[in-house]
Image: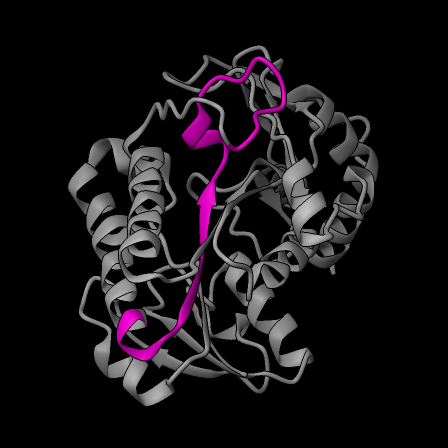
């Protein structure tokens, strides 16, 4: 197959591109390198520099992809609150541009969405039909992208697929800005800075390892549409995560600094992944400790 990966120079996208190259696919990465890095690109993948906010007919005409894994996004919640129009141009208009180009060329989209930011507060593992109650424009823009995919499926008979990721962590995650807390903790261990926990640390998330996310993402290709949660079904508090991180890193003597809670932060987020298990034949294979060890080894090498 010929496969296009938007955001393929970024954290999750580069892992997807790497797995596709290893599988022998012809892989083209579309990335504007605003946050992605050239060094993340796997050998054998072609890079096309481009911005999804612009029409995508020309790149699609040149690549003629069978599948497009759409991972390019504005993913910073704080940026979405401060600049909702910027967030919407990338996450909504960008997705529409890809849908239009995909429609012209018969390309299936596999769209990376978000679980926690869409469901809002969870009272248990959230299934795909749980109420969608985003607390920030980022979640709203991702939900809008999902609805556009569903509309195109109904209107044009396409079979685009949505994946709602949990809190993904792993090698190549950027520890700067509002990045994943795992990368931030490990970066602070390496720099000798004191790690910081916002609030009391009892807030929980569904942490899922990037390698497992890639397997689910590739398994979604070729499906007849649908929405799937991609997580572990298990929640871990921030203080529990910190304890695991410092044990893995051999930093048991390091104590965290507690800071005031951030406004609007979710207290509980966990995903029900039974649909992905049943329909995609997928399940997470890495325990949290295993994934953290591999991540630490990558960052500390």
Please give the count of numbered marks on the rendered protein.
0
* 247 relative to 139 in the view: left or right: right
Q: On screen, 212 above or below 4?
A: above
x, y percentage for residue 263? 36, 16
* 7 relative to 233 in the view: left or right: left
Would residue 122 be counted in the magenta stretch?
A: yes
Answer with the quarter of the image where residue 31 lies: bottom left
In the image, 176 versus 219, the foreground residue is: 219
Answer with the quarter of the image where residue 16 lies: bottom right
In the image, 103 versus 230, the foreground residue is: 103
Q: Residue at x 58, y 10 (%)?
A: 200
The quadrant of the image that shows the N terminus is bottom right
Q: Residue at x 26, y 76 (%)?
A: 104
* 108 relative to 145 in the view: left or right: right
Would residue 154 be counted in the magenta stretch?
A: no
x, y percentage for residue 121? 48, 17
Q: On screen, 264 above or below 295?
A: above
Magenta segment = 103-128
Q: Residue at x 57, y 29 (%)?
A: 127
x, y percentage for residue 169? 62, 46
């Amino acid at each position: 197959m010929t496969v296009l990966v938007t955001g393929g120079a970024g954290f999750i996208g580069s892992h997807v591109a790497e797995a596709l190259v290893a599988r022998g696919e012809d892989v083209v990465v579309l990335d504007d390198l605003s946050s992605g890095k050239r060094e993340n690109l796997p050998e054998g993948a072609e890079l096309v520099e481009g911005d999804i906010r612009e029409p995508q007919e020309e790149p699609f005409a040149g690549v003629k992809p069978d599948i497009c894994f759409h991972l390019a996004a504005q993913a910073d919640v704080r940026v979405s609150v401060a600049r909702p129009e910027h967030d919407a141009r990338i996450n909504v208009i960008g997705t529409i541009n890809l849908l239009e180009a995909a429609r012209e060329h018969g390309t299936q989209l596999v769209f990376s969405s978000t679980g926690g930011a869409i469901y809002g507060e969870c009272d248990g593992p959230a299934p795909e039909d749980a109420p969608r109650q985003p607390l920030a424009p980022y979640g709203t823009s991702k939900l809008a992208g999902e609805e556009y995919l569903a509309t195109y499926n109904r209107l044009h008979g396409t079979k685009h697929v949505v994946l709602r990721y949990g809190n993904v962590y792993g090698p190549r995650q950027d520890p700067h800005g509002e990045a994943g807390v795992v990368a931030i903790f490990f970066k602070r261990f390496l720099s000798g800075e004191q790690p910081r926990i916002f609030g009391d640390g009892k807030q929980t998330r569904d942490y899922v390892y990037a390698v497992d996310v890639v397997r689910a993402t590739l398994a979604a290709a070729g499906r007849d549409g649908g929405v799937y949660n991609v997580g572990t079904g298990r929640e871990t508090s921030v203080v529990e995560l910190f304890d695991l991180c410092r044990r893995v890193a051999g930093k048991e003597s390091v104590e965290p600094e507690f800071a005031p809670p951030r406004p609007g932060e979710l207290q509980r987020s966990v995903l029900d992944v039974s649909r992905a298990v049943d329909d995609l034949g997928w399940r997470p294979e890495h325990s949290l400790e295993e994934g953290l060890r591999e991540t630490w080894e990558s960052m500390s090498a």
